[in-house]
Image (cartoon, helix red, strand yellow):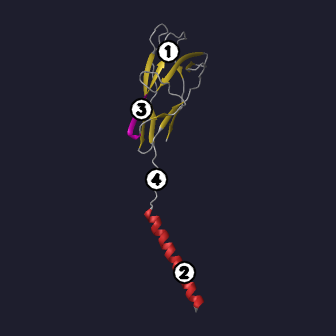
């Protein structure tokens, strides 16, 4: 009889602990981590390049995204496919001719946007501009120059 009472008490304690665990789980609900979405990037369009013009050719692109707070996103832009001599380069055709350019994080074009993460503000329907510049007085052949860079959005 004493043994049966002890078994009943043990069972009652186990039910009580199980109920307490359910209440504790309900007190701390699960939360989904914030996530960024709808990320898009416009291309830099430099237009025609005049090899005799002493003024560089500038362009502006935009990164658009939805990234709710408290997420603190950063963006990196790689060196491109033909990087050399400390500069990004666009290539003509098979890559026999190069047109040097760079991408900047600021409108004054003083901070090169590279593989070092640049913080961008969180927000819904947010945009961040990036600034391109083709350097002046480059002796290159006529034709269409292109490059591909990878923009990485970290959050």
- Residue to which mark 3 is pinned: 128
Disc number lying in front (2 or 4): 2
Image: magenta residue range: 122-129
Dot 1: element: loop
| Residue annotated with mark 2 | 11
Number of labelled discs?
A: 4
**Residue at 49% across, 76% down:** 16
Q: Residue furthest bottom?
A: 1
Name the secondary structure under disc 2.
Answer: helix
The residue positioned 58% from the left and 89% from the top of the image is 4
**Spatial separation of the CA atoms under disc 1 and disc 2:** 80 Å
Q: For mark 4, what is the residue?
A: 32
CA separation in Å, label 3 and label 2:
61 Å
Looking at the rendering, which quadrant does residue 71 occupy?
A: top left
Where residue 35 appears, x then y in whole percent? 46, 46
Q: Position of residue 73 (x, y in %)?
A: 47, 39
* Earlier residue among tags 1 and 2: 2
- Image quadrant in which the N terminus is located: bottom right
Which structural element holds mark 4?
loop
Q: Earlier in the sequence, mark 2 or mark 4?
A: 2
Which quadrant of the figure has residue 26? bottom left
Magenta region's main secondary structure?
Answer: strand
- Report which residue position mark 1 lands on: 135
Q: Residues within 10 Å of mark 1 (few under 14, many from 20)?
A: some
Q: Does label 3 or label 1 sit earlier along the sequence?
A: 3
Q: Is residue 39 above or below residue 12?
A: above
Q: CA distance from mark 1 to mark 4?
A: 46 Å
Q: Earlier in the sequence, mark 1 or mark 4?
A: 4
Q: Residue at x 42, y 45 (%)?
A: 70
User: What distance separates the C-alpha of mark 3 from that of mark 1?
Assistant: 23 Å
Using the rendered image of the protein, determine whether residue 47 is visible from the camera's viewpoint.
no
Residue 37 painted magenta: no
């Amino acid at each position: 009889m004493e043994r049966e009472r002890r078994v009943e008490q043990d069972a009652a304690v186990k039910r009580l602990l199980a109920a307490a665990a359910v209440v504790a789980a309900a007190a701390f609900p699960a939360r989904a981590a914030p996530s960024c979405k709808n990320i898009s990037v416009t291309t830099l369009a430099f237009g025609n390049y005049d090899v005799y013009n002493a003024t560089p050719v500038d362009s502006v692109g935009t990164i658009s995204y939805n990234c709710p707070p408290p997420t603190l996103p950063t963006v990196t832009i790689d060196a491109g496919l033909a990087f050399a001599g400390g500069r990004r380069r666009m290539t003509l055709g098979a890559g026999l001719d190069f047109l040097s350019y760079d991408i900047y994080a600021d409108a004054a074009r003083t901070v090169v946007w590279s593989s070092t993460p640049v913080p961008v503000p969180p927000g819904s329907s947010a945009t961040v501009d990036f600034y391109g510049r083709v350097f002046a007085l480059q002796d290159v052949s006529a034709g269409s120059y292109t490059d591909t860079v990878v923009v990485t959005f970290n959050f």
